[in-house]
């Protein structure tokens, strides 16, 4: 979701302050979403720079290996991506290769240097924004209890070096920003949990009164419980639809497939019906992609649907393909 007004203001103040401190042509706040793709949610730039605000980038643009390094070494500066790298010669007495993962002096990977040059960015400064990990968060650093919320990314069209005292001042500024973001994230989570519990109570009461149809025909309904584009109820052979959904006939087909192949479970949640093995997924088009389904009885099913993300947002960077995945080695 897009940042709240408070979070948006925090981001806008940060990029302006970092720009004034460092003099970079462009400063951005880059936020990671739940599916690991990134979005530029705030930007401060010189008038001649192409705007990146609002662009989304696939998760593979910043792979897991790079994100892990940002948790260990939270500031990364590249003074000149076109400079010839200086070879590091290791002493013969060391049997194992020396890891430069924690060094700010290491040269950028050739692919990343080329990526920067193609963007017209010769120099960069990137600082990690970390917040407290969730209780069920697995993509975090256990040693610090932190997870990567996003990055503050600075670009410059010519070579640029920022001395350590100034880098350290920016790092402290980003740390304070991270603390404020953490408060906003925790507050939003509490509000969301309270809202869900309230809706849950009303919907459960409808089910207990043996009127399941009310959860899709009255207010609040099941779409208020889950962020989705549509919902459907298959009950006693009939179908009720809300929002963007498959047709009634398609809902019946999905129900039969679900009961046949997932009948031993309470339900199914998937980002892609095609990847889940549903044979009729291609007939649903991009309007319906992800699905969550819960059996409310042995033969009755409640559905939530989400549309294809690529149809809703503007992608930047490398050509985005939903089948691309991060192997964690890049």
Image: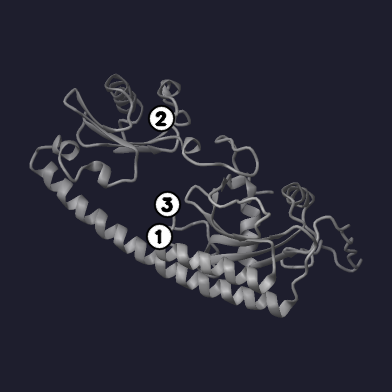
Give the spatial CA distance, label 1 vs label 3.
9 Å
Give the total number of marks visible in the rendering. 3
Mark whose residue sits in front, 2 or 1: 1
| 83 to the left or right of 250 | right
Q: Residue 317: horizontal and vertical position, in percent? A: 64, 44
Label 3 and label 2: CA atoms lie apart by 19 Å
Q: Quadrant of residue 66?
A: bottom right
Residue 1: mark:
3
Q: Residue 278 in the image: state x and y as whole percent.
A: 41, 25
Give the camera-side residue of 102 and 40.
40
Q: Which residue is mark 2?
A: 287
Q: Which residue is mark 1?
A: 4
Instruction: Provide the secondary structure element on which disc 3 rests.
Output: loop
Crowding at label 1, few (<14), some or many (≥20) Cα neighbours within 10 Å? few
Where is 253 relative to 178, above or below? above
Q: Quadrant of residue 26?
A: bottom right
For the question of whether residue 146 can be seen, the reply is: no
First in sequence, mark 3 or 2: give its number.
3
Foreground pick, 173 / 71: 173
Q: Is residue 82 above or below residue 75?
A: above
Q: Residue at x 73, y 48 (%)?
A: 115
Relative horizontal placement of residue 248, taking residue 310 as reference (left or right): left
Query: SS for tag 2?
Result: loop
Neighbor class of circle 2 (other Cα within 10 Å; few <14, some 14-19, many 20+) is: some
């Amino acid at each position: 979701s897009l940042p709240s007004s408070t979070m948006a203001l925090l981001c806008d103040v940060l990029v302006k302050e970092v720009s004034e401190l460092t003099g970079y042509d462009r400063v951005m706040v880059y936020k990671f979403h739940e599916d690991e793709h990134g979005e530029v949610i705030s930007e401060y730039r010189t008038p001649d720079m192409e705007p990146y605000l609002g662009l989304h980038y696939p998760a593979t643009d910043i792979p897991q290996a790079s994100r892990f390094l940002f948790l260990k070494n939270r500031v990364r500066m590249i003074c000149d991506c076109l400079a010839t790298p200086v070879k590091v010669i290791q002493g013969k007495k060391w049997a194992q290769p020396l890891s430069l993962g924690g060094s700010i002096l290491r040269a950028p990977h050739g692919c990343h240097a080329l990526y920067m040059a193609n963007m017209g960015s010769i120099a960069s400064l990137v600082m990690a924004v970390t917040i407290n990990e969730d209780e069920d968060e697995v993509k975090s650093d256990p040693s610090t209890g932190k997870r990567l919320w996003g990055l503050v990314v600075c670009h410059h069209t010519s070579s640029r070096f920022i001395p350590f005292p100034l880098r350290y001042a920016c790092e402290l500024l980003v740390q304070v920003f991270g603390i404020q973001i953490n408060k906003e994230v925790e507050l939003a989570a509490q509000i969301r949990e309270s809202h869900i519990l309230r809706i849950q109570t009303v919907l459960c009461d409808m089910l207990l009164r043996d009127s399941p149809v009310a959860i899709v025909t009255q207010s609040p309904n099941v779409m208020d419980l889950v962020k989705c584009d549509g919902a459907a109820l298959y009950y006693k052979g009939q179908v009720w639809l809300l929002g963007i959904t498959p047709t009634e006939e398609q809902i019946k087909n999905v129900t039969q497939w679900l009961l046949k192949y997932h009948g031993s479970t309470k339900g199914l949640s998937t980002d892609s019906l095609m990847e889940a093995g549903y044979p009729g997924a291609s007939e649903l088009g991009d309007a319906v992609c992800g699905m969550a389904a819960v059996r409310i009885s042995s033969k009755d099913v409640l559905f939530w649907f989400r549309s294809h993300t690529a149809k809703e947002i503007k992608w930047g960077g490398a050509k985005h393909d939903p089948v691309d995945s991060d192997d964690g080695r890049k």
